[in-house]
Image (spheres, rainbow, N blue to C red):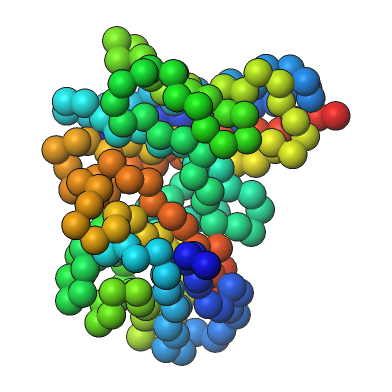
Amino acid sequence: EADIYQTPRYLVIGTGKKITLECSQTMGHDKMYWYQQDPGMELHLIHYSYGVNSTEKGDLSSESTVSRIRTEHFPLTLESARPSHTSQYLCASSDPLQTGYGRNEQFFGPGTRLTVL
Amino acid sequence: AQSVAQPEDQVNVAEGNPLTVKCTYSVSGNPYLFWYVQYPNRGLQFLLKYITGDNLVKGSYGFEAEFNKSQTSFHLKKPSALVSDSALYFCAVRERSNDYKLSFGAGTTVTVRA
């Protein structure tokens, strides 16, 4: 079944730990995105990718990094987590290969709620 | 630059009454417009979109939205609200000349009371 997956769903860790949030999609999409959703619930784009080996910074500055080695996989890494990184992180994807031209909706994963103590 | 405003943080309605969630946008040129809904501890679910053509767009779960170019609005509506419609609703916009990035509004919390 075509879907977008995020693991873990919930993560509680201590300050200074390195973490990787996983995102995978079986939608056949080439565009992928990471959003940070703060306690006020507003969404901010922090990273996006147009395809393999393509990554760009989003509108909100973030200390996280991303990689896109495979079309279906778009992990987000924090080298040293801090309490200020506590938030919900949402992964999304859109646009099947070579189609869409921006008119297609984004599909979202269930999110990872990160708490850094 | 593209942006979206959702002027109401909260909307409260009684079950069976009409529901309206307001959205206005700002873009250069013509927009693509989207509505999403988010339930607690979940990701966003797509409801409907306006691309071109008929100004009245019908979507999932009985929702519809009307594109009004002169008022730069894209209000979400449902004729008869259900308690299960209680959730957080986001409007989003993308300029047609832009790349694939969406700009989201701040969200409107809808509460439908029984």
- Above or below B57: residue B85: below
Residue drawn at (71%, 26%), measured in percent from left and top?
A: B81
Q: Nearer the viewer, residue A11 or B101?
A: B101
Front-lying residue, A114 or B112: B112
Reply above or below: B84 against B41.
above
Residue A93 visible in the current orientation: yes
Residue at image coords 42%, 88%: A18
Does B35 sit left or right of B17 as displayed? left
Q: Residue furthest top?
A: B70
| x then y, percent, for residue B37 | 56, 43
Tell which residue pokes out farthest to the front in this image.
A1
Q: Residue furthest right?
A: B114
Pick whichever, B33 or A13, lies toward us: B33
Q: Residue furthest left?
A: B97
Query: In the shown orientation, is residue B13 left or right of residue B104?
Result: right
- Does residue B54 appear left or right of residue B78 in this picture? left
Q: Is residue B54 above or below residue A67?
A: above
Q: Nearer the viewer, residue B74 or B58?
A: B58
Residue at image position (45%, 24%) is B57
What residue is rendered at 59% in x and 73% in y?
A9
Quarter of the image that includes the C terminus of chain A: bottom right
Q: Total label count? A: 0
Position of B7 with respect to B68 (left or right) is right
Residue B110, image quadrant: top right
Q: Give residue B45's position: percent from left, percent from top.
A: 53, 48
Horizontal and vertical percent position of residue A98: 19, 57
Where is residue B54 drawn, in percent x and y? 36, 18
Residue A36 visible in this rendered orientation of the protein: no
Residue B86 sits in quarter: top right
Q: Quadrant of residue B31?
A: top left
